[in-house]
């Protein structure tokens, strides 16, 4: 990737977030109040046409989590601790395809690290929640369940936010989040994070490092979400960061901001019937300070299309990351945008095993005019305990 200190990998988002963002949802209760779980994801992708070079890669990730609720020590159920340890390994498919958005949302530097370690308190029936500690910003902010099916990273965290100093996969930061749920499915939330996740220049291992140049990453989001059998979400958010970084032409900067608008809606179906969900993502950042100034993503997925397989899902989505004028001026051979088109099918074999064939077509990978469009085919397998 070409973004230097801002980001070495436009990662995850939310496709990976959905694998670990619901503590205890798929974990085993080893004792009242304590949940232990593990998830293993293994991908095999091949760049069969275009890109920088043809070839095959196999990124993988293992996550082990422990959730400890208040019942474990005879306290209130409003209290919760959560920890998870992440291991990433394997080879890079983006190095071959040359894409900038990150076509595989588990691909990362090969290492192990403490990924999350946070405390959460819910203030009874008031609807107020606080979460403090080492955590992934994207688990709570700028994410959509309907986009979680897809493997391309931009469907998890839009590309304009991903190039900021946000706490995200695979390197998280210490931060605090406050959320207030109102009556009628409305909510507001805000956050303050260390402005530089990890330690610059040290991608391996766990680093909780505070420096005067780290700055802060702050954000706010407001929206409505709910719907029961017809789930929906509409939210608008913004972020502001003060960490030192180099802009598109190498100038030292220390302030940046961006925004996003996200939405999803169940269009058809319900309990016991095939369900059609659609989503839209819009993102933006300062064009004079960032390589990307606009992002647009959209797609749909159908769950339970085959009656005998009610949990299988088929999805089609498009992600377009637009290059800023400042970046294009500094890089004359760059194109205006990179567009990723993804077709995927997630097959739930049983409650522990999932297979997901995936096809992606990348137009103008890496924004390069001289790089042919890339066609990538792959398979994800997931084991959950």
Image (cartoon, rainbow, N blue to C red):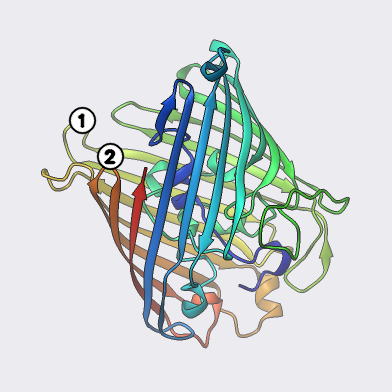
Image label count: 2
Name the front one of labels 1 and 2.
Answer: 1
Compared to residue 382, the image places residue 265 above or below, namely: above
Residue situated in front as seen by the camera: 316 or 66? 66
In the picture provided, is 263 more to the left or to the right than 179?
A: left
Residue 229 is at least partly visible in this image = yes
Which quarter of the image is occupied by the N terminus? bottom right
Residue situated in front as seen by the camera: 212 or 218? 212
Q: Which residue is mark 1?
A: 271
Image coordinates of residue 151 in percent, x first then y, are: 41, 58
Quarter of the image where one finds residue 251: bottom right
Residue located at (48% from left, 64% from top): 320
Image coordinates of residue 203 in percent, x first then y, are: 67, 62
Quarter of the image where one finds residue 357: bottom left
Residue 141 is at least partly visible in this image = no
In the picture provided, is 234 more to the left or to the right than 275?
A: right
Quarter of the image where one finds residue 146: top left
Residue located at (55% from left, 42% from top): 84
Which quarter of the image is occupied by the C terminus? top left
Compared to residue 307, the image places residue 156 above or below, namely: below
Compared to residue 47, the image places residue 346 above or below, namely: above
Point out which mark residue 208 bears: none
Residue situated in front as seen by the camera: 28 or 239? 28
Residue situated in front as seen by the camera: 63 or 102? 63
Helix or strand or loop: what does disc 1 sit on? Answer: loop
Q: Which residue is mark 2?
A: 267
Residue located at (60% from left, 41% from top): 237
Image coordinates of residue 319 in percent, x first then y, are: 45, 61
Helix or strand or loop: what does disc 2 sit on? Answer: strand
Tell me whether circle 1 and circle 2 mark residues in contact (CB < 8 Å). Answer: no
């Amino acid at each position: 990737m070409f973004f230097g200190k801002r980001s070495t990998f436009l990662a995850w988002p939310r496709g990976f977030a959905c694998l670990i963002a619901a503590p205890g949802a798929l974990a085993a209760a080893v004792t009242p109040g304590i949940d232990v779980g593990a998830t293993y994801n293994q991908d095999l992708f091949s760049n069969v046409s275009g890109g920088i070079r043809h070839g095959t890669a196999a990124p993988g990730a293992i996550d082990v989590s422990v959730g400890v609720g208040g019942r474990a020590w005879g306290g209130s159920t409003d209290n919760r601790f959560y920890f998870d340890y992440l291991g990433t390994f394997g080879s890079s498919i983006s190095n071959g395809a040359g894409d900038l958005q990150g076509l595989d949302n588990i691909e990362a530097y090969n290492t192990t690290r403490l990924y999350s370690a946070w405390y959460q308190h819910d203030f009874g029936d008031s609807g107020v929640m606080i979460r403090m500690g080492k955590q992934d910003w994207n688990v709570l902010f700028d994410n959509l369940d309907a986009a979680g099916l897809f493997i391309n990273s931009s469907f998890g965290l839009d590309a304009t936010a991903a190039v900021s100093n946000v706490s995200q996969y695979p390197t998280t930061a210490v931060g605090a989040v406050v959320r207030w749920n109102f009556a009628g499915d409305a909510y507001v939330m805000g956050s303050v994070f260390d402005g530089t996740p990890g330690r610059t220049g040290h991608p391996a291992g766990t680093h909780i490092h505070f420096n005067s140049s780290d700055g802060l990453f702050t954000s706010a989001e407001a929206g409505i979400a709910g719907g029961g059998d017809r789930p929906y979400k509409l939210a608008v958010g913004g972020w502001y960061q003060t960490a030192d970084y180099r802009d598109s032409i190498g100038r030292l900067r220390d302030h940046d901001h961006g925004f996003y608008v996200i939405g999803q809606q169940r269009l058809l179906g319900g309990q016991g019937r095939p369900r059609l969900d659609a989503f839209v993502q819009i993102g933006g950042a300062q064009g004079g300070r960032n390589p990307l100034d606009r992002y647009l993503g959209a797609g749909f997925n159908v769950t339970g299309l085959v009656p005998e397989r009610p949990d299988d899902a088929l999805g089609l989505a498009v992600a377009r990351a637009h290059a800023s004028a400042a970046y294009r001026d500094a890089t004359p051979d760059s194109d205006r945008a990179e567009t990723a088109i993804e077709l995927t099918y997630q097959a739930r074999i049983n409650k522990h095993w999932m297979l997901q064939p995936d096809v992606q077509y990348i137009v103008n990978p890496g924004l390069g005019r001289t790089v042919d469009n890339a066609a990538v085919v792959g398979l994800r397998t997931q084991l959950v305990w």
